[in-house]
Image (cartoon, rainbow, N blue to C red):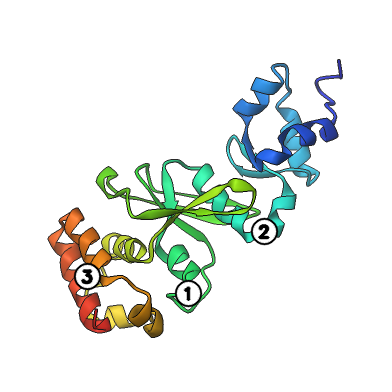
Amino acid sequence: MHNRNKMNFIEFRNRFLSLACFTTNQVYASYPGFNRNNLGRWVRQGYLVRLRQGYYAFPEYRESAEFALYFANVIYKPSYISLHAALSFYGIIPEAVPGITSVTTLKTITFSNDFGEYSYKNIKPEMMFGYDLREMEGGRRIMLATPEKALIDLLYLYPFYNTERDLKDLRLDESYMEEDFNAERLMEFTDRIGSKALSSRVNILRKVHNL
């Protein structure tokens, strides 16, 4: 068998490329005698991208923006993309978002890697709803908040949005809010959470946008 310290990268790539993102545990399951130093060397050589501790991807996947979103779900579970990243995805806020924002039942944390900056905000387990599974290439799916839940998560996690002026400063796209936004779903989700403070901020949002 090949020298464990000088493992053939081509063989390794052929084994794991289709996974897009893989963990060190998956590597050891396939190659029990694998030398972890190979991963560090391949990252330094540009053959691999380290997403976070124990998670790696191949640089080829940078060519598709979908994979940057997909990795957000994979490297910190359970989580779904929400907040500014989801609002930008739908075109509800005008500016491009520099990082990928998600919510999770785990602790608040941030990871930086070659695919971008991934930030995760903690929410209660009972708020882990209101997301869709969006199909992407290769049969994979991305967990992404609905527009209504992305706004609810934002108002819940950023309580300083509590006046008409603050909510106008979000600069939500008027045509989207008039034509595509589901006000009934917004209220259904708000009622399900049952927070008076959140309900108050949602009512201000409804007034600003005539929802």
Judged from the image, the secondary structure of the residue bearing numbered disc 3 is helix
Name the image quarter holding residue 183.
bottom left
For marks 2 and 3, give the CA distance.
35 Å
Task: Sort mark 1 into few (<14), some (14-19) or many (20+) by Cα contacts within 10 Å.
Answer: some
**Which residue occupies 20% across, 63% down?**
198
Whether label 2 touches label 3, CB < 8 Å: no
Q: Position of residue 144 (x, y in %)?
A: 44, 56
For marks 2 and 1, give the CA distance.
19 Å
**Which residue occupies 72% across, 36% down?**
40
Q: Earlier in the sequence, mark 3 or mark 1?
A: 1
Judged from the image, the secondary structure of the residue bearing numbered disc 1 is loop
For marks 3 and 1, give the CA distance.
20 Å
Name the image quarter holding residue 187.
bottom left
Residue 111 showing in the rendered view: no
Q: Is residue 66 left or right of residue 100?
A: right
Look at the image and tell me in which quarter the C terminus lies. Answer: bottom left
Look at the image and tell me in which quarter the N terminus lies. Answer: top right
Amino acid under disc 1? Gly
Say the numbered circle drawn on residue 202: 3
Q: Write down the residue under mark 2.
A: 64
Judged from the image, the secondary structure of the residue bearing numbered disc 2 is loop
Looking at the picture, does residue 38 appear above or below residue 198?
above
Q: Write down the residue under mark 1.
A: 91
Q: Earlier in the sequence, mark 2 or mark 1?
A: 2
Amino acid under disc 3? Val
